[in-house]
């Protein structure tokens, strides 16, 4: 019962306020209200606090600081119980200290500073209360309801557990009373059986788990509140909010840290196990270790919570199972992403190549197909090999393009990788340090840009820390850049200048029809090619005996060990092989030939070759070389004289414009007879032609043997071609024009159209009598057939067409109206040959150079007489009279030459219309 100080009964509102005062915070209006309701607190029966009797507070006393109020309390004896009036007086005094008088009093007059400070304080307080009131109120209600429900559940569970323990104890005691006689033994046994689990520890564990669950929510709301408060204080500030900073840090952690996602998943799993274990430990009778294990089983298998008993245990187990399902979904996502990323890496060619002694090709161009074909043929004798291609293309696209190539790989595996040869990490990815040969392809497009990229690639290759055991074969587009690339690469680099090689081949083939097919046979691996090998059993033998020591090969030169490995083509017959010398031969494969006993060559009548008298010459040698003695011997005339062939006047037409036109003119000037004419027909204006030639280093005034004749026009327009004396040219060279050389199909279409127009114009200008005679001789085409007319015109002049696409080759082969040059395929063959053996590059450079030895097609009357039966060895010895090496022949009734023929010692009858292929010095 509560009593009032004045004896009047308390009102209903007063009683309700008194009963709920301990847990409802008074409102702002109530605290600062001038009307104070007198309340008489009800005595609490179980209150453990008793104010002292001697301490009284005056209603008019000012409210001092909290320190004074706290110091006014004294220690109270536990046996003291105050009267109701004393307790009322104590409550009044506490209200006075708190600033809430029981009696209404006159409000004191406040100063302006006090009023302003009070207003500021009230605004701040109201602002704090307005911060998300609905959310805070909802959270507080939900938290309170859940806490009360859990508390009631735990209380009931505790009481049930205690009752069960008491029942079990009583049952045990009853049984012991019947069985035991000693009371002491009963008491000790009862103490052992009784179990007193730490209930307070379980409650603490449950509260900790709840706090850990709610804490992140309050932390996020606090961060959001701080961010919004900063924006309200300073709207113009550019400072990044706190939540954005946290999101950025998390993003950086996930992006930079390796295995960040699996680590985050592991941490989340451990946290869920710990929180679930603590919660289970609080609501069940299990130990902490068992609770943690049970929590893990709920996470691993969400169906295990079906066996839970009790409301609290079921609620916690369902929560843990729900979190386990989320973690399992995250784990599936991570595993799926990892597998997809790995397959994507394999699909895009990002994985590392684990190979050794493979051929590495860097770059992508139209020559790749022919290069792969030649490498596959070269590796066939070894049972196949490995070729790795790395380019800045998608791996799937590269594999698709290679799969469309119409040739057999013959056991060779082609591995594609996507990457840049300028990045060391990508080079290491293709095991560049373990490759046996590296081929750098030139890019399609501008020559200078292509060579600049090749130079940077060589720099990247020389910067590999592990070092290179392979040589580098670099395809260049401009001869002027060769010196710079060799300067950077040093001894590791072998260069093949594609444009220069094709230009020189076109000139050779134009002057010697049929030479293009012979070059294809020698450069390609399908027939016979160059090989260099040492044979110790040949040491001390003269070269003239070495020539007939191989039944399956034709010796062509010697690699002299004493001269630093210099290769000498077509050496003197009297040269004696020394220790360490190697033999250069033309054979079908490197394992198909070996020296044998010297064959018995029948005495063949040697033809009398009368060399023309040489004119006296005066030669100046400036400088000193270590092989100066060999030069003096050669210049002294001790070597056998060869027949000098009188050069005749020639007229050559060049259709189109190439960027290395000045080099072709220089080669033609050195090889043609004096007074020859070189007609240049293209769309470049004459003034601009002279400027380009001069910029390229050509001095037109110093041309000795040729006269330049300029004509301007389009090579695919008939009326422009008809203005030229096409029937009077000895050779016509149709070049892949510089304006369309980037597109192989477009360049070939233009070349093919020019070829057909020229042949048609030539056929129309032939005399009728010659046309009838030709049709009678060749009856394969009907009279008036346009192909027949063009074939007739092809016998009058030689047309060499520069073809870039191999598919165009079939069209020209079927029509037989042109002696073609397949430029891309020939360059690919040269690259493959140098990649297999870098020493062959020295041989090719000499054969393509302006000076030295080259391939020639000779007439039969230089070696045989009508009706003679001779073996290949006998004709070879006759060719040695002319300082020539015979390597093959072409019969009159066949179209393909035979290089390195079998059965070299068998005699046969030859025709005067046959031709022979030899290696001889340039005329």
Image (cartoon, helix red, strand yellow):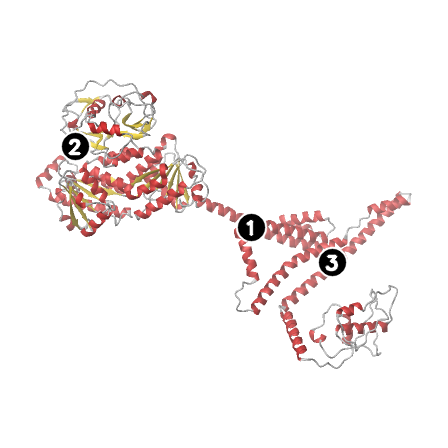
Q: Can you name the residue that lies furthest to the front here?
A: 623
Q: Nearer the viewer, mark 3 or mark 2?
A: 2
Q: Is residue 261 above or below residue 633?
A: below
Which residue is depicted at the point 74% across and 58% down? 153
Please, what secondary structure does the residue beneath circle 1 have?
helix
Name the residue tied to disc 1. Answer: 261
The residues bearing labels 3 and 1 have C-alpha atoms spaced at a distance of 39 Å
For the C terminus, which image quadrant?
Answer: top left
Give 370 or 826, whichever is nearer the viewer.
826
First in sequence: mark 3 vs mark 2 = 3
Q: Can you tell which mark lies on residue 153?
A: 3
Alpha carbon separation for disc pair 1 and 2: 85 Å
* Disc on res. 617: 2
Residue at (62% x, 50% y) in the render:
269
- Can residue 806 be seen from the camera position used here? no
Residue 724 located left or right of residue 16: left
Q: Please report the residue visible at 85 percent of the width from the left and 47 percent of the height from the top.
A: 190
Q: Quadrant of residue 764?
A: top left
Identify the mark nearer the N-term, 1 or 2. 1
């Amino acid at each position: 019962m509560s009593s009032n100080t004045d004896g009047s009964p308390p009102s209903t509102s007063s009683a309700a306020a008194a009963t709920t005062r301990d847990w409802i915070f008074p409102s702002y209006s109530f605290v600062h209200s001038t009307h104070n309701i007198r309340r008489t607190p009800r005595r609490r029966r179980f209150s453990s606090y008793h104010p002292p009797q001697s301490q009284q507070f005056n209603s008019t006393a000012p409210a001092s600081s909290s320190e004074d109020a706290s110091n006014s309390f004294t220690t109270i004896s536990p046996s003291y119980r105050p009267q109701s009036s004393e307790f009322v007086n104590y409550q009044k005094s506490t209200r006075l200290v708190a600033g809430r008088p029981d009696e209404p009093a006159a409000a004191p007059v406040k100063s302006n500073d006090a009023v302003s400070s009070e207003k500021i304080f009230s605004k701040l307080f109201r602002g704090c209360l307005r911060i998300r009131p609905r959310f805070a109120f909802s959270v507080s209600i939900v938290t309170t309801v859940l806490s009360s429900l859990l508390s009631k559940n735990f209380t009931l569970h505790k009481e049930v557990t205690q009752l069960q323990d008491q029942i079990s104890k009583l049952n045990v005691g009853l049984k012991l009373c019947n069985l035991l006689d000693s009371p002491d033994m009963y008491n000790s046994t009862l103490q052992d059986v009784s179990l007193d689990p730490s209930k307070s520890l379980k409650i603490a564990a449950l509260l900790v788990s709840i706090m850990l669950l709610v804490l992140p929510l309050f932390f996020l709301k606090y961060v959001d509140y701080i961010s919004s408060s900063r924006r309200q204080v300073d709207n113009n500030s550019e400072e990044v909010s706190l939540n954005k900073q946290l999101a950025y840090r998390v993003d950086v952690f996930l992006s930079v840290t390796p295995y960040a996602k699996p680590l985050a998943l592991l941490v989340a799993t451990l946290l869920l196990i710990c929180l679930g274990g603590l919660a289970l430990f609080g609501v069940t009778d299990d130990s902490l270790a068992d609770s943690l294990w049970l929590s893990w089983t709920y996470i691993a298998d969400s169906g295990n919570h079906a066996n839970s008993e009790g409301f609290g245990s079921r609620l916690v187990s369902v929560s843990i199972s729900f979190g386990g399902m989320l973690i399992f979904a995250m784990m599936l996502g991570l595993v799926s992403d990892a597998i997809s990323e790995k397959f994507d890496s394999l699909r895009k060619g990002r994985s590392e190549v684990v190979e050794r002694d493979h051929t590495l090709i860097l770059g992508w161009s139209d020559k790749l197909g022919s290069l792969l074909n030649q490498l596959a043929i070269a590796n066939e004798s070894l049972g196949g090999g490995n070729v790795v291609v790395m380019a800045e293309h998608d791996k799937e696209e590269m594999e698709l393009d290679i799969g469309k190539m119409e040739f057999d790989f013959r056991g060779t595996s082609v591995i594609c990788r996507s990457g840049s040869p300028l990045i060391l990490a990508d080079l290491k990815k293709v095991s560049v340090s373990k490759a046996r040969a590296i081929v750098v392809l030139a890019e399609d497009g501008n020559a200078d840009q292509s060579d600049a990229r090749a130079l940077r690639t060589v720099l990247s290759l020389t910067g590999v820390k592990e070092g290179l055991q392979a040589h580098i074969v670099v395809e260049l587009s401009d001869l002027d850049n060769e010196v710079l690339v060799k300067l950077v690469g040093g001894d590791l680099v072998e260069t093949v200048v594609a444009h220069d090689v094709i230009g020189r081949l076109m000139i050779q083939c134009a002057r010697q029809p049929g030479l293009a097919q012979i070059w294809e046979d020698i450069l390609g691996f399908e027939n016979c090619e160059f090989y260099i090998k040492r044979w110790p059993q040949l040491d001390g033998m003269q070269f003239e005996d070495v020539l007939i020591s191989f039944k399956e090969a034709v010796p062509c030169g010697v690699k002299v060990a004493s001269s630093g490995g210099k290769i000498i083509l077509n050496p003197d017959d009297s040269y004696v092989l020394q220790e360490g010398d190697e033999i250069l031969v033309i054979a079908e494969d490197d394992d198909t030939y070996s020296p044998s006993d010297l064959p018995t060559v029948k005495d063949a009548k040697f033809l009398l070759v009368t060399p023309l008298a040489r004119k006296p010459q005066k030669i100046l040698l400036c400088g000193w070389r270590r092989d100066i003695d060999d030069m003096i011997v050669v210049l002294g005339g001790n070597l056998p004289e060869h027949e000098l062939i009188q050069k005749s006047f020639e007229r050559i037409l060049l259709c189109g414009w190439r960027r290395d036109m000045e080099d072709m003119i220089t080669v033609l000037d050195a090889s043609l007879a004096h007074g020859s004419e070189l007609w240049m027909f293209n769309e470049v204006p004459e003034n601009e032609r002279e400027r380009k030639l001069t910029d390229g280093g050509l001095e037109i005034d110093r041309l000795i043997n040729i006269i330049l004749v300029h004509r301007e026009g389009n090579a695919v327009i008939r009326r422009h071609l008809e203005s030229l004396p096409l029937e009077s040219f000895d050779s016509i060279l149709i070049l892949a024009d510089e304006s369309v050389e980037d597109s192989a199909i477009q360049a070939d279409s233009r070349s093919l159209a020019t070829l057909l127009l020229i042949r048609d114009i030539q056929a129309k200008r032939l005399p009728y009598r010659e046309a009838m005679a030709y049709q009678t001789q060749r009856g394969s085409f009907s009279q008036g057939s346009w192909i027949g007319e063009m074939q007739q015109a092809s016998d009058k002049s030689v047309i060499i067409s520069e073809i870039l696409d191999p598919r165009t080759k079939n069209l020209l082969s079927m029509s037989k109206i042109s002696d073609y040059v397949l430029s891309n395929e020939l360059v690919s063959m040269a690259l493959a040959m140098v990649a297999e053996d870098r020493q062959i590059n020295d041989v090719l450079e000499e054969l393509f150079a302006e000076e030295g030895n080259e391939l020639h097609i000779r007439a039969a009357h230089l070696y045989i007489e009508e009706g003679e039966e001779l073996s290949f060895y006998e004709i070879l010895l006759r060719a040695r009279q002319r300082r020539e090496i015979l390597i093959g022949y072409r019969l009159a009734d066949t179209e393909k030459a035979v290089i390195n023929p079998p059965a070299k010692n068998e005699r046969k009858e030859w025709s005067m219309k046959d031709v022979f292929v030899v290696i001889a010095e340039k005329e």
